[in-house]
Image (cartoon, helix red, strand yellow):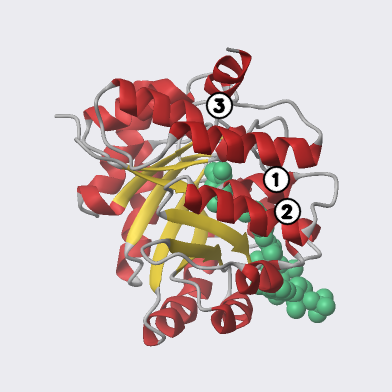
Amino acid sequence: ACPDRVTLVDVGPRDGLQNEAQPVPTEAKIELIHRLQAAGLKEIEATSFVSPKWVPQIADAAQVLAGIQRQPGVRYSVLTPNLKGLEAALPGRPDEVVVFAAASEAFSRKNINCSIEESIERFVPVVQAAQAAGIRVRGAISCAVGCPYQGEVAPSEVGRVAALMKSIGVQHVGVADTIGVGTPRAVQAALEAALAHYPLAEVSGHFHDTYGMAVANVYASLEVGIHTFDTSVSGLGGCPYAKGATGNVATEDVVYLLHGLGIHTGVDLPALIQAGAYIRGVLGQANGSRVARAMMAK
Ligand code: HMG
Ligand code: MG
């Protein structure tokens, strides 16, 4: 049974902009967040407290988080791979922090320089400190259907990481097709593996559109009852450790799909399209959302 409402987490300011080759002004990042919340997004992944040596684009994480004029009812999340990241994030009072592990050993090494098990151990104090501060913890499971270094990833690997995350107190897991190779049944199998450990409300889908499958994969997720998705305004993004991966599925495209299905999102599509046009204008790039391109051409 398809859900009748869906929560979208716009990860464009983080997952999208972390990947830009050109420097993006801090004010533009903040303006994008303001436009997303004005368009009705209730969850925004704002930035990332990772090493700026690894991801130079996020060196202004603290300024971004501090610069947001917060809107009541909106949840602002940030990535924190270790205690250092969490401690740097805390003064900015994020509503949620995100720890990220991979379902593939090879990707774990490339992305966070440690094995899957080591990453989970590293998250233990992060989860404890976040929860002591009253902050929710979400976990992302990268390469949940395929890995750029290792090829296919079995659902059992996703299940293993989900179980580990559950065991350390992570409250929600996102099943991420980081390189966008997944097809609907494979994605459903990965989601089912996470659902063996978490309830429906605490599993989300995070799809990239590299092979053009992302919207189909959102639909496949709805079929198994998933009602939270990470999406990225105007399809911003890619992944610095996954060569050739395109952006996340565009928020505009998913909103169009959901509204067409009669599913409530709370998002104002024209305002969202303007937010996407704004950031693509700053970047001097074509819009990655098909829906935005079609509607702006009218
Ligand atoms: P490391 O080099 O093994 O760590 O990196 P380290 O502890 O040896 O630290 C190295 C240096 O970084 C030290 O500085 C630390 O202080 C500093 P130095 O002493 O050399 O001057 N450092 C930090 N600085 C700021 N914030 C921190 C931090 N931690 C250490 N939190 C580490 C390990 C995890 C830090 C590194 O690998 C890293 O930052 N990786 C992040 C990679 C990343 O952000 N990838 C993109 C996000 S994941 C993703 O996009 C996938 C996802 O979106 C799902 C999907 O799209 O499918 C979630
Ligand atoms: Mg992503």
Ligand 1 image position (quadrant): bottom right
- Relative image position of residue 158 (x, y in whole percent): 39, 46
- Relative image position of residue 288 (x, y in whole percent): 64, 27
Secondary structure under the numbered disc 3 in the rendered image: loop
The residue under label 2 is 28
Residue projecting furthest to the left? 1
Question: Which label was assigned to residue 209?
Answer: 3
Name the amino acid type tagged 3: Asp
Q: Is residue 174 visible?
A: yes
Residue at point 58%, 67% (across, down): 81
Label 2, label 1: how many angstroms apart (C-alpha)? 24 Å
Label 3, label 2: how many angstroms apart (C-alpha)? 25 Å
Residue at point 69%, 41% (across, down): 279
> What crowding class fits label 3: few (fewer than 14 Cα within 10 Å), some (14-19), or many (20 or more)?
many
Tell which tag, 2 or 1, sits nearer the viewer: 2
Question: Contact, CB < 8 Å: mark 3 with mark 1?
Answer: no
The residue under label 1 is 241
Q: Earlier in the sequence, mark 3 or mark 1?
A: 3
Secondary structure under the numbered disc 2 in the rendered image: helix
Residue at point 80%, 59% (across, down): 56
- Relative image position of residue 285 (x, y in whole percent): 77, 30
- Relative image position of residue 9 (x, y in whole percent): 44, 49
Residue projecting furthest to the bottom? 132
Say above or below: 17 vs 178: below
Ligand 1 lies under 8 Å from the Cβ of mark 1: yes
